[in-house]
Protein backbone atom coordinates (compact mmCIF):
# COMPACT_ATOMS: atom_id res chain seq x y z
CA UNK A 1 0.00 0.00 0.00
CA UNK A 2 1.10 3.53 -0.72
CA UNK A 3 -0.93 5.53 1.82
CA UNK A 4 -3.27 4.78 4.75
CA UNK A 5 -6.50 2.98 3.86
CA UNK A 6 -10.00 4.41 4.24
CA UNK A 7 -13.13 2.69 5.56
CA UNK A 8 -16.44 2.74 3.74
CA UNK A 9 -19.12 4.46 5.87
CA UNK A 10 -20.86 1.12 6.51
CA UNK A 11 -17.59 -0.52 7.62
CA UNK A 12 -17.93 -3.34 5.06
CA UNK A 13 -15.10 -2.29 2.73
CA UNK A 14 -11.62 -0.81 2.88
CA UNK A 15 -10.24 1.45 0.14
CA UNK A 16 -6.49 1.77 -0.51
CA UNK A 17 -3.82 2.59 -3.10
CA UNK A 18 -1.32 0.02 -4.31
CA UNK A 19 0.97 -0.76 -7.22
CA UNK A 20 -0.71 -2.71 -9.94
CA UNK A 21 0.73 -6.13 -10.75
CA UNK A 22 0.61 -5.28 -14.47
CA UNK A 23 3.33 -2.66 -14.21
CA UNK A 24 6.37 -3.93 -16.15
CA UNK A 25 8.69 -1.06 -15.10
CA UNK A 26 7.46 -0.87 -11.47
CA UNK A 27 7.03 2.87 -11.82
CA UNK A 28 4.98 4.78 -9.26
CA UNK A 29 1.68 3.89 -10.90
CA UNK A 30 -0.58 3.42 -7.91
CA UNK A 31 -4.29 2.92 -8.31
CA UNK A 32 -7.24 2.67 -5.95
CA UNK A 33 -8.74 -0.62 -4.85
CA UNK A 34 -11.66 -1.67 -2.69
CA UNK A 35 -11.57 -4.77 -0.53
CA UNK A 36 -14.96 -6.18 0.46
CA UNK A 37 -14.48 -7.75 3.91
CA UNK A 38 -17.49 -10.08 3.72
CA UNK A 39 -16.79 -11.35 0.21
CA UNK A 40 -12.99 -11.25 0.68
CA UNK A 41 -12.77 -9.75 -2.78
CA UNK A 42 -10.56 -6.99 -4.19
CA UNK A 43 -11.89 -4.66 -6.91
CA UNK A 44 -9.77 -2.20 -8.85
CA UNK A 45 -11.37 1.26 -8.97
CA UNK A 46 -8.94 3.37 -11.02
CA UNK A 47 -6.45 2.59 -13.76
CA UNK A 48 -3.36 4.66 -14.59
CA UNK A 49 -4.35 7.54 -12.30
CA UNK A 50 -1.29 7.52 -9.99
CA UNK A 51 -3.83 7.58 -7.18
CA UNK A 52 -3.20 7.63 -3.44
CA UNK A 53 -4.75 8.75 -0.12
CA UNK A 54 -8.39 7.77 -0.73
CA UNK A 55 -11.22 9.09 1.42
CA UNK A 56 -14.81 7.89 1.03
CA UNK A 57 -17.71 10.36 1.18
CA UNK A 58 -20.11 10.01 4.13
CA UNK A 59 -22.80 8.55 1.86
CA UNK A 60 -20.30 6.08 0.37
CA UNK A 61 -21.03 7.25 -3.19
CA UNK A 62 -17.76 9.05 -4.02
CA UNK A 63 -14.06 8.84 -3.31
CA UNK A 64 -11.67 11.78 -3.19
CA UNK A 65 -7.98 11.02 -3.67
CA UNK A 66 -4.62 12.51 -4.57
CA UNK A 67 -3.42 12.07 -8.15
CA UNK A 68 0.19 12.85 -9.07
CA UNK A 69 1.53 13.96 -12.44
CA UNK A 70 4.73 15.75 -13.45
CA UNK A 71 5.72 16.47 -9.84
CA UNK A 72 2.39 18.06 -8.94
CA UNK A 73 -0.27 16.49 -6.71
CA UNK A 74 -3.92 17.34 -7.31
CA UNK A 75 -7.23 16.12 -5.90
CA UNK A 76 -9.73 14.12 -7.92
CA UNK A 77 -13.14 12.60 -7.21
CA UNK A 78 -14.65 9.41 -8.67
CA UNK A 79 -17.80 7.46 -8.03
CA UNK A 80 -17.21 4.40 -5.83
CA UNK A 81 -17.17 2.21 -8.97
CA UNK A 82 -14.48 4.37 -10.62
CA UNK A 83 -16.79 6.17 -13.05
CA UNK A 84 -17.15 9.94 -13.43
CA UNK A 85 -13.52 10.87 -12.77
CA UNK A 86 -13.09 14.58 -12.16
CA UNK A 87 -9.95 16.45 -11.13
CA UNK A 88 -11.10 19.15 -8.70
CA UNK A 89 -7.87 21.11 -8.17
CA UNK A 90 -5.78 22.54 -11.00
CA UNK A 91 -2.31 22.82 -9.53
CA UNK A 92 0.40 22.90 -12.22
CA UNK A 93 3.52 24.45 -10.65
CA UNK A 94 4.70 21.68 -8.33
CA UNK A 95 2.09 22.29 -5.62
CA UNK A 96 1.19 19.29 -3.49
CA UNK A 97 -2.13 18.13 -2.06
CA UNK A 98 -2.09 15.55 0.75
CA UNK A 99 -4.54 13.61 2.92
CA UNK A 100 -7.98 14.66 1.65
CA UNK A 101 -10.89 14.11 4.06
CA UNK A 102 -14.62 14.67 3.57
CA UNK A 103 -16.62 16.87 5.90
CA UNK A 104 -19.32 15.10 7.92
CA UNK A 105 -22.01 16.45 5.58
CA UNK A 106 -20.04 15.55 2.44
CA UNK A 107 -20.16 19.09 1.11
CA UNK A 108 -16.48 20.00 1.71
CA UNK A 109 -13.10 18.33 1.38
CA UNK A 110 -10.27 19.34 3.69
CA UNK A 111 -6.62 18.59 2.84
CA UNK A 112 -2.99 19.54 3.46
CA UNK A 113 -1.60 21.83 0.77
CA UNK A 114 1.93 22.99 0.05
CA UNK A 115 3.32 25.52 -2.34
CA UNK A 116 7.01 26.36 -2.53
CA UNK A 117 8.17 26.55 1.08
CA UNK A 118 4.81 26.83 2.87
CA UNK A 119 2.30 24.26 4.03
CA UNK A 120 -1.27 24.89 5.08
CA UNK A 121 -4.69 23.32 5.55
CA UNK A 122 -7.13 24.04 2.73
CA UNK A 123 -10.70 23.17 1.79
CA UNK A 124 -12.59 22.80 -1.47
CA UNK A 125 -16.14 21.96 -2.50
CA UNK A 126 -16.37 18.51 -4.17
CA UNK A 127 -17.26 20.11 -7.52
CA UNK A 128 -13.91 21.97 -7.51
CA UNK A 129 -15.19 25.38 -6.44
CA UNK A 130 -14.52 27.27 -3.23
CA UNK A 131 -10.81 26.49 -2.76
CA UNK A 132 -9.38 28.33 0.23
CA UNK A 133 -6.96 28.18 3.12
CA UNK A 134 -8.34 27.45 6.58
CA UNK A 135 -5.65 29.31 8.48
CA UNK A 136 -5.03 32.00 5.88
CA UNK A 137 -1.25 31.59 6.18
CA UNK A 138 -0.76 31.18 2.44
CA UNK A 139 -3.54 33.43 1.22
CA UNK A 140 -3.19 36.72 -0.62
CA UNK A 141 -4.44 39.81 1.26
CA UNK A 142 -7.56 39.95 -0.96
CA UNK A 143 -8.36 36.30 -0.33
CA UNK A 144 -7.69 36.70 3.39
CA UNK A 145 -10.35 39.44 3.58
CA UNK A 146 -12.87 37.00 2.04
CA UNK A 147 -11.85 34.03 4.18
CA UNK A 148 -14.72 32.12 5.71
CA UNK A 149 -14.28 31.81 9.46
CA UNK A 150 -17.90 31.65 10.46
CA UNK A 151 -19.14 28.90 12.76
CA UNK A 152 -21.44 27.37 10.09
CA UNK A 153 -18.49 26.71 7.75
CA UNK A 154 -16.48 25.17 10.59
CA UNK A 155 -19.44 22.96 11.48
CA UNK A 156 -19.71 21.83 7.84
CA UNK A 157 -16.04 20.80 7.90
CA UNK A 158 -16.05 18.92 11.19
CA UNK A 159 -19.64 17.88 11.79
CA UNK A 160 -19.72 19.77 15.08
CA UNK A 161 -19.72 23.37 16.16
CA UNK A 162 -16.14 24.35 16.81
CA UNK A 163 -13.64 27.05 16.11
CA UNK A 164 -11.46 24.83 13.90
CA UNK A 165 -10.87 27.70 11.49
CA UNK A 166 -9.04 29.68 14.13
CA UNK A 167 -7.09 26.80 15.72
CA UNK A 168 -3.45 26.23 14.93
CA UNK A 169 -2.65 24.46 11.68
CA UNK A 170 -0.85 21.61 13.47
CA UNK A 171 -3.92 20.83 15.58
CA UNK A 172 -6.16 20.86 12.50
CA UNK A 173 -3.68 18.61 10.68
CA UNK A 174 -3.87 16.11 13.55
CA UNK A 175 -7.66 16.03 13.26
CA UNK A 176 -7.63 15.71 9.47
CA UNK A 177 -4.91 13.06 9.31
CA UNK A 178 -6.38 10.79 11.98
CA UNK A 179 -8.50 8.07 10.41
CA UNK A 180 -12.02 7.90 11.80
CA UNK A 181 -13.88 4.72 12.65
CA UNK A 182 -16.91 3.86 10.50
CA UNK A 183 -19.66 6.21 11.58
CA UNK A 184 -17.08 8.84 12.64
CA UNK A 185 -17.45 8.12 16.35
CA UNK A 186 -13.75 7.86 17.21
CA UNK A 187 -10.28 8.61 15.90
CA UNK A 188 -8.22 5.50 15.13
CA UNK A 189 -4.59 5.65 16.22
Image (spheres, rainbow, N blue to C red):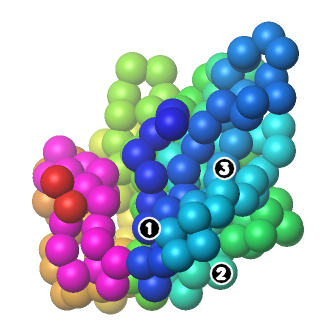
Residue drawn at (39%, 20%) of the image: 117
Q: Nearer the viewer, residue 52 or 111?
A: 52
Q: Is residue 179 above or below residue 57?
A: above
The spot of residue 149 in percent (x, y) is 30, 72
Disc with the residue nearer the chain's start (3 vs 2): 3
Mark 2 element type: loop
Residue carrying label 1:
7
Q: Is residue 166 above or below residue 1?
A: below
Residue drawn at (36%, 50%) of the image: 121
Which of the 4 image quarters holds residue 76? bottom right
Mark 3 element type: strand
Residue drawn at (73%, 34%) of the image: 20
Residue carrying label 3:
32
The spot of residue 175 in percent (x, y) is 22, 59
Disc with the residue nearer the chain's start (3 vs 1): 1
Q: Tell whether 16 sits left or right of 103.
A: right
Disc with the residue nearer the chain's start (2 vs 1): 1
Q: Which mark is residue 22?
A: none
Residue carrying label 2:
61
**In this rendering, which labeled residue sits more in front, label 2 or label 1?**
1
Is residue 88 visible in this depiction of the protein?
A: no
Question: Is 35 colored magenta in this rendering?
Answer: no
Q: Quadrant of the C terminus?
A: bottom left
Amino acid sequence: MRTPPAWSPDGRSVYYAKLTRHNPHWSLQFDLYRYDLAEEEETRITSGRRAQSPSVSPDGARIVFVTVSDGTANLAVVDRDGNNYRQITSFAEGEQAYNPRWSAAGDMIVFDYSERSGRDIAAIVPDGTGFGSLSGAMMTPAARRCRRTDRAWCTALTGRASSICTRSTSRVATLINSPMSPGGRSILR
